[in-house]
Amino acid sequence: MTVLDRIIASLRGDADVWPADTDWHEVLTVAEHHGVTVMLANAVANDILRASARRSTERAFQLARQLRILVEELTASGIDVLPIKGPVLAVTAYGDPARRGVSGDLDLVVRPRDFERALACLLAIGYTRHEGAADEEHEHEQWESEAHLLPPAVPGTMVELHTDLIGNFHTAPVNLDAVLSRARTQMLFGVPIRVPAAEDLLLYLCLHGARHLWSRLVWVSDIDAVIRSESSLDWETLFARAAAIDATQRLALGVQLAHQLFHTPLPRLPSLLAARDRDQRRTIALFARRMADTSAGRHVPSLRVRFASELAVRETLAQRFTYLYKQLTPTPRDRAWLRLPRGMGWLHVVLRPLRLLTRYGEEYEKKK
């Protein structure tokens, strides 16, 4: 068994999976790469894990307080805000704002018409916009409808302000007004905060995991936790919403991964059974490789693995064509990478594949 296999077994509640000569520093490193340190520390009695979990717990409560302030400020300005992931997901799925551990940032979703007001509100309380945080994954997005903001003081984390739930996955947009109308209220440190309905949350988590190629275990754990915590999930409605945006395969893949890794109980639905029978084993094996790379600290996949993974989670020819077209279309970063004389800009079309090879090849080697 690999270290990741043993971590998964421990999170499932399996006993006696750790040999006496276990290198707990290695275990901690792998758990941190996958974002499951706190959960593992709760499952395994080990001082090294517990010490790291204590630090992560303190940080999680700091972020929960930061989120509470953000929601209060935006709500006071008459802006409907929907926090995604982070402390709210921890409370909703795990029952504790610190139970999930610390996420990388705080994601807030507002209606497009409220974006400028929300941005002005956050700038007014000391946040600063920092679009330099964008990476290759975000470079095709419309920055007039998304913002990355740094907090005014430490401790704090970056805030990502969005106007949709999907991002740049080249998928039909989810009706945000409908999601907001179905949202529930969750108390966080005495403040009522909107959280997505269980079906909307589960669909989002599956789309998010697919977007990031299922490279971290915590994203599968989140799906398992939501399913187990929501006994009244309306699976038929959930698959109908996925079908409306051509995301049935990604939804099925997410819940099948949870079932395979965590033995998550699933209903016997035709949609799930059909999706499982359509080349799911090969796709799941592909993402198992991505998780193995993450365990080794290789967070950036090779170009071949990235393309194979990205195409595997796109279920229509239109989605695959759009992805390939976007990947091969020159971006502002390509033009900054190599400035060409006027009239020679067409060469960027030829050079774009070279830049992709250079970028992902170098980063993959660097992460090994």
Image (tube, rainbow, N blue to C red):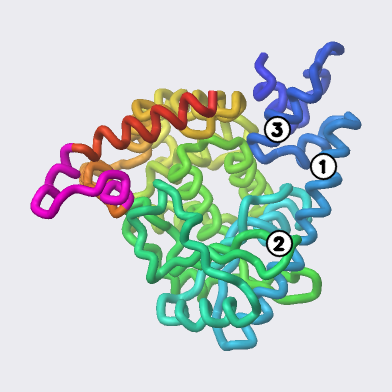
Residue 53's disc is 1
- Camera sees residue 319: no
Q: Position of residue 162 (x, y in %)?
A: 48, 66
User: Is residue 27 inside the magenta stretch?
Assistant: no
Name the secondary structure under disc 3: helix
Q: In this view, does 92 lie to the left or right of 216?
A: right
Q: Return the residue at label 3.
A: 31
Label 2 vs label 3, nearer the camera? 2
Q: Which of marks 2 and 3 is nearer the N terminus?
A: 3
What kind of residue is marked 3? Ala
SS at badge 2: loop
Residue in view at x 91 percent, y 31 percent = 47
Reading the image, the residue beneath label 2 is 156
Question: Which residues are drawn in magenta?
Answer: 333-350
Examine the structure image and report whether residue 349 is included in the region drawn in magenta.
yes
Q: Residue 75 carries which label?
A: none
Which sits in the foreground, 209 or 338? Answer: 338
18 displayed left or right of 258: right
